[in-house]
């Protein structure tokens, strides 16, 4: 029987192209993209106070779009291109068809033994560069959006618009190249399967740092900040959970055994963590909290990420138990006893759900990484967790040192970026905007209900230097109004 034409080598289907791997990579990229847009857009819009729903959603929406343009213009090749420094690649566009249609490759991932012979070949997935560029973009985008969770409800939107491209270029690309793109931590053998350090530890530390420099919300918001739509919040959380199958399943760059194990482990850990967090809520507060369950889901997903494809499924349960309890203790108990944590207004607790859970996951990977799974995935062929003896204790040390590097870089780079922006744009909204919320910042509200107590009148609030023509809807919600 003749081979179907679609599977014969041709200019659009070269002999190196594996259509199954390419399909899975594009599906994975789409799943990760859905985590951000609409997943986190919906989650953020719903989990905040009503007056900040539009602003919170917009910060996520803007970051998704801005990161993509910066990514293809310069940032992708800073993270996955040719080496400039041991922790940084050479920036260049990823836009030309000659670059995008050739076989994907991470050039600096070729790994050598100490004697100079090749231990692991450079990563060359069986799909085009275009698939890899887009897949890695979705990771960069979600990192910025997670970071935004720390500064919701008070960061000047113009400062945020300047911060996103600068942090992407000067912070995210450094972690990505160092751990994934062939940088010094990659070649040292640090395990970060799908971003426990690159994404979650970095966003948690950078978010906490940004929250410190931007300053706190107004007193009334800090004292009472109820979600405006719990059911819609669950819809956003559901998109986040289901999208994580692409997050961890796409990391091997192939639809292979490791991707299957990673998807299973991801869901096991998330479910375990959610149940443990909920059980602790019931034990200490007498009631199961929906918001708490979402937090537990999140910490489980974050914790498994650095080791999803290199730990056994029983280990995923162990990681879930710890990710549902240790971040719970840090958020519910230690936070209230620490003067530093009390001083910094981390709106959604990103420090606990991402920095603490990401660090926990990275260190647990250094303990529980299974040798045979490591051989299938990692460039350093004798990698193993400390639980399995041999050089495992050294692996744990590598994980710890890498975490300290990521923490230090994000503290310093985020501080420098924000202080530089502050020279030109205030980091925090004016007090009048903080009191009013979306209507003052965007001229829009989340729920356009007629006569719903709109407080911002552009004809009276001249102190904001906003010029508006008279509106027939001054006494009601602006936007689309249906006259019944």
Image: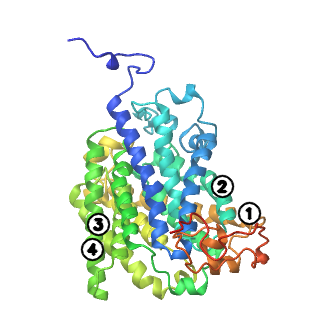
Question: First in sequence: mark 2 or mark 4?
Answer: 2
The structure residue drawn at horizontal position 51% and vertical position 34%, both measured from the top left corner, is 107
Which quadrant would residue 155 be assigned to in this image?
A: bottom right
Residue under label 4, please give it: 276
> Which residue was labeled with disc 1?
420
Q: Are the residues tagged 1 and 2 within 8 Å (C-beta)?
A: yes
Under circle 2, the secondary element is helix
Q: Which residue is mark 3?
A: 320
* Residue 402 picture location, percent across and down: 48, 58
Q: Seen in the image, is 170 located left or right of residue 140? A: right
Category of crowding for the residue at label 2, using alpha-carbon neighbours closer than 10 angstroms: few (below 14), some (14–19), many (at least 20): some
The residue positioned 50% from the left and 43% from the top of the image is 181
Which is nearer the eye, 454 or 55?
A: 454
Question: Toward which corner of the image does residue 258 lie, by quadrant?
Answer: top left
- Residue 424 vs 71, above or below: the answer is below
Residue 5 position, x and y percent, is: 33, 15
């Amino acid at each position: 029987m003749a081979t179907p034409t679609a599977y014969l080598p041709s200019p659009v289907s070269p002999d190196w192209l594996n259509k199954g791997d390419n399909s899975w990579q594009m599906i994975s990229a789409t799943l990760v993209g859905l985590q951000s847009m609409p997943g986190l857009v919906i989650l953020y819009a719903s989990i905040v106070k009503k007056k900040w729903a539009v602003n919170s959603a917009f910060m996520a929406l803007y970051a998704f779009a801005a990161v993509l343009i910066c990514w293809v213009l310069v940032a992708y090749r800073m993270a996955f291109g040719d080496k400039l420094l041991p922790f940084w690649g050479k920036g260049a566009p990823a836009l030309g068809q000659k670059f995008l249609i050739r076989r994907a490759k991470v050039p600096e991932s070729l790994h050598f033994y100490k004697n100079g012979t090749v231990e692991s070949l450079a990563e060359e997935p069986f799909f085009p560069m275009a698939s890899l560029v887009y897949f890695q973009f979705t990771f960069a985008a979600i990192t910025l959006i997670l970071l935004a969770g720390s500064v919701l409800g008070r960061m000047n939107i113009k400062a945020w618009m300047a911060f996103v491209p600068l942090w992407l270029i000067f912070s995210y690309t450094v972690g990505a190249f160092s751990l994934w793109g062939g940088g010094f931590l990659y070649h040292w053998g640090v395990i970060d399967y799908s971003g426990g350090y690159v994404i979650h530890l970095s966003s948690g530390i950078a978010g906490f740092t940004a929250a410190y420099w931007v300053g706190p919300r107004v007193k009334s918001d800090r004292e009472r900040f109820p979600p405006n739509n719990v059911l819609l919040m669950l819809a956003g959380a559901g998109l986040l959970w289901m999208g994580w199958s692409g997050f961890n399943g796409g990391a091997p760059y192939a639809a292979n055994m490791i991707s299957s194990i990673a998807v299973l482990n991801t869901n096991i850990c998330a479910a375990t963590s959610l149940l443990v967090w909920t059980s602790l809520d019931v034990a200490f507060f007498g009631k199961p909290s929906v918001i708490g369950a979402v937090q537990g889901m999140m910490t489980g997903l974050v914790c498994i990420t650095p080791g999803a494809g290199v730990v056994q499924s029983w280990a995923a349960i162990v990681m879930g138990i710890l990710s549902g309890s240790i971040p719970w203790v840090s958020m519910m108990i230690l936070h209230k006893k620490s003067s530093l944590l009390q001083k910094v207004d981390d709106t959604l607790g990103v420090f606990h759900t991402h920095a603490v859970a990401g660090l926990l996951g990275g260190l647990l990977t250094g303990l529980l990484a299974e040798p045979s799974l490591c051989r299938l995935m990692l460039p350093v062929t004798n990698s193993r967790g400390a639980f399995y003896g041999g050089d495992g204790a050294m692996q744990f040390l590598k994980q710890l040192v890498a975490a300290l590097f990521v923490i230090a870089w994000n503290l310093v780079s985020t501080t420098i970026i924000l202080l530089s922006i502050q020279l030109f744009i205030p980091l925090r909204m004016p007090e009048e905007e903080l009191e009013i919320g979306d209507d003052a910042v965007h001229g829009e509200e989340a729920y356009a209900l007629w006569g719903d107590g709109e407080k911002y009148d552009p004809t009276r609030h001249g102190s904001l230097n906003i010029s508006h023509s008279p509106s027939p809807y001054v006494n009601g919600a602006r936007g689309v109004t249906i006259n019944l």
